[in-house]
Image (cartoon, grey):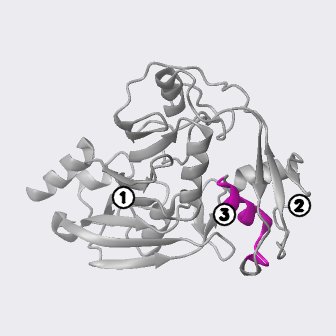
Amino acid sequence: MTEKILTIEPATPDEEGTRADKHLSQKSGLSRVQVSRLMTEGCVTPPVKPKDKIHTGDAFTIRVPEAQPATAKPQAIPLDIVYEDADLLVINKPAGMVVHPGAGVHEGTLVNALLAHCKGSLSGIGGVQRPGIVHRIDKDTSGLLVVAKNDTAHQHLAAQLAKHTMTRTYQAIVYGLCPASGKVEGNIGRSPHNRQMMAIVPKGKPAKTHYQLIKPLFNGKASLIECRLETGRTHQIRVHMTSIKHPLVGDATYGHAPKGTPDILRLFPRQALHAATLGFIHPTTGKYMEWSAPLPKDMTLLIQASDVW
């Protein structure tokens, strides 16, 4: 990726009062984290701070420096590639695979596998340790995510993600008999009691999760549900479902098995969550595309066990 200059058009009256990081993120297709970092590094002209308010007529340029080479090493790890073209890949990630290197994890990640598969053809906007990664799912969550092969595709996809126009549905197994359908709203941010966890907090980011019951399991001890995200906050489904007393089976961080839970549920080794559907406008063709991934074997076996329980 060579250095790029992004020109942000003058703000309209409707955009008056918007936070600068949010405004520039929506206009550029970069994430708010990326925009904030570029502000700190003096790459936004005129200079502005993330929390500053936008005024009508404000215009900016953003200098996106050339990306540094990835420090992660390519590794020939098999990938379940659902779709691939010159601009992007859609991957069905297995549970247990970390998306990108982080503290204490430097090998065996999706990024390591992508560096080997794509042989350098990945976008650089994601930063040194996250080439091509537009969004992520937790290590112990399985399912679909999209990876950008070039910066144009990355910016286009990131903009859809920021505007919440990307289709994402999940299937989950939760404790208890879930209502037929519903919506959970609650701002999500870092827990004031444990910074490693997320929680519903007054000053968190707005979050909405729609859910519907697919099938009761284990005579109402659990439920298979589908969740549709309006927003994409960290651990959103896990936090929201716990807040309505239907935590995810296997989620030792946010939920615990109620009394009387069958051992087969209580001992499930991960949060029973799968990114089942992913859809977006293709950055080059302009056509809407959508993919689905079937439930992984461990969740399928758990559902089958319910039928004979």
Badge 1 crowding class, 10 Å Cα cut-off, few under 14, some 14 to 19, many 20 or more, is many
Which quadrant: the N terminus?
top right
Asked if disc 3 and disc 2 are in contact, CB closer than 8 Å, the reply is no
Percent position of residue 75, x then y:
50, 19
Residue 221 drawn above or below residue 253: below
Residue matched to label 2? 48
Crowding near pointer 2: few (<14 within 10 Å), some, many (20+)? Answer: some
Q: Total number of numbered labels?
A: 3
> Which label number is shown at residue 101?
none
Q: Is residue 170 left or right of residue 41?
A: left
Q: Nearer the viewer, residue 14 or 227?
A: 14
**Residue 309 appears in the rendering:** no
User: In this rendering, would 279 be left or right of 124?
Assistant: left
From the image, tell me which residue sits under label 3.
193
Q: Residue visible at 54% across and 20% down? A: 74
**Mark 2 belongs to which amino acid?**
Val
* First in residue order: circle 3 vs circle 1: 1
Q: Which residues are magenta?
A: 15-29
* Closer-to-camera residue (175/186): 186
Q: Which residue has dot 1 on it? A: 170
Q: Hey, which quadrant is residue 192 in on the image?
A: bottom right
